[in-house]
Image (tube, rainbow, N blue to C red):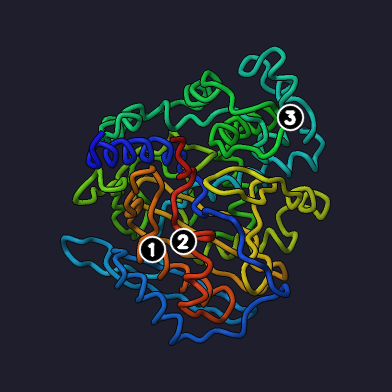
Amino acid sequence: MTMRQLRKTAVRRAAAVAMSLGVLVAATPAQAAEAGSGTGLDRQALRQALGAVHEAGMYGIYSAVRDGAKSWQGASGVADVRTNRPVTSGMVHRVGSITKTFTAVALLQQVARGTVELDAPIGRYLPDVVPGERGQRITVRMLLNHTSHIADFVGPAFPSLYEGSPQSLDDNRFRRFTRLEVARLGLDAPATGEPGSTPGVYSNTNYVLAGMILQKVTGMEPEEYITRHVIRKAGLRHTSFPRTPFIPGPHSKAYESLFGLIDPPRDYSVYEVSFLNTAGALTSTMDDLNRFYRALLRGELIGPAELAEMRKTVPVAAGGLLDYGLGIYAYDLPCGRFWGHSGSVFGMATESLTSEDGKRQVSMGVNRTKYQTVDENGQVVPHAIDYASLEYLLRAACGTGGNAQARAAAPQFVPFAVDQVRVKR
């Protein structure tokens, strides 16, 4: 096989496995230092570090940072490469799998009310969807911490990705998948392991099923319940489940490269994301995300017992190994432990982190995804954007940066790296 053929095969495989659209961090965590937030907000340094991400090749990036009562928002680059319309810090953004934290909070509210038991079999709530032994062995907790080993549905929903073609992305642009339809795609695929075994395997199907349980016990559409009891309770003004393929409010384009399979990158900002529903369909702003995680970790959305359950982590395979709780996971940065989630849809990626003490926060979104190349072994090669993004993240989260520190940490901790990039040879 020639080098060209090897590369084509590697890109094809990488494209196929990178489509679970959830976790963005290849997380073999950096060594944690003392817990705590950074050393204040150096606004000039933040602006420079954010600009460096754009200069490294990212079309546009926007971010919100908080340190106690102090806050900063910034943006760099363009929202539209054709018109050069600039990005702004308050743009509405598809936040992908950050939706999972909202869904987990909603279900934990029902746990507190006694309508759902974390360690009850999901067959109790969804006997027709997950019948028989499987429904009895998999628990609600296993859905929320990705140890159910139910396969992800995104690959089967976009089958051309297995052939190294983006055709499915275009074919499904305006297709509305039902909740049951995508759940069946995951349930009918081969299981990734035994229920409850660790490491777990990250799967969007888990959170579609979680949404179905929420619907069963509340009698409401899960998006409606989450809007009323999570989004509004947290005081979020720019967060919603869009009812159309359009992003509500001022927003950027969303440019997908698919590791060079789409060249030049194609805009997918107008897209029907109903297939992700309670696993990844939310839109939000970076400031709203900070507000949400601050309210969550302060105990304003769920009680202390439920928050403690949320922070019980297990190892979950998602490119690397994550310390995954219930819809939230832990990041160990040089300045301490942070909690949060990341997310991706075609053309947009997001990262949101909050320090253990709740004082330091950073959320950032970008409008270009899978810009990296793939080597002959099917491994994603970090791009200059990845190093610049990590430099910015360290500056925003820890109050200090340092290119040498960023390069030492990457690619173990790479913001905006696609999930499940470890390819079977």
- Disc 1 marks which amino acid? Met
**Picture disc at residue 139:** 3
Q: What residue is pinned by disc 1?
A: 91
Q: Residues within 10 Å of mark 1 (few under 14, many from 20)?
A: many
Name which residue lies at 68% across and 26% down.
194
Which residue is most to the left? 82
Q: Position of residue 349 (x, y in %)?
A: 42, 54
Which residue is most to the top? 132
Q: First in sequence, mark 1 or 3: give its number.
A: 1
Name which residue lies at 62% across and 68% down.
333
Q: What's the CA distance linking mark 1 and mark 3?
A: 38 Å
Give the structural element (helix, strand or loop) at label 3: loop
Q: What residue is pinned by disc 2?
A: 285
Q: Look at the numbered discs 2 and 1 and tell me whether their residues touch, using CB distance below 8 Å.
A: yes
Q: What's the CA distance linking mark 2 and mark 1?
A: 6 Å
Q: Residues within 10 Å of mark 2 (few under 14, many from 20)?
A: many
Query: Where's the C terminus, which quadrant?
Result: top left
Q: Note whether 289 is above or below 313 in the view shown.
A: below
Q: Look at the numbered discs 1 and 3 and tell me whether their residues touch, using CB distance below 8 Å.
A: no
Q: What's the CA distance linking mark 2 and mark 3?
A: 33 Å
Query: In the figure, residue 151 lies in which quadrant?
Result: top right
Report the front residue among 27 and 272. Answer: 27
- Disc 2 marks which amino acid? Thr
Q: Note whether 384 is above or below 123 in the view shown.
A: below
Q: Position of residue 389 (x, y in %)?
A: 43, 67
Name which residue lies at 70% across and 12% down.
132
Query: In the figure, residue 41 lies in which quadrant?
Result: bottom right
Relative placement, left or right, of 324 versus 117 is: left
Relative placement, left or right, of 46 versus 324 is: left
Q: Say which of marks 2 and 3 sits in front.
A: 3
Q: Position of residue 78 (x, y in %)?
A: 27, 67
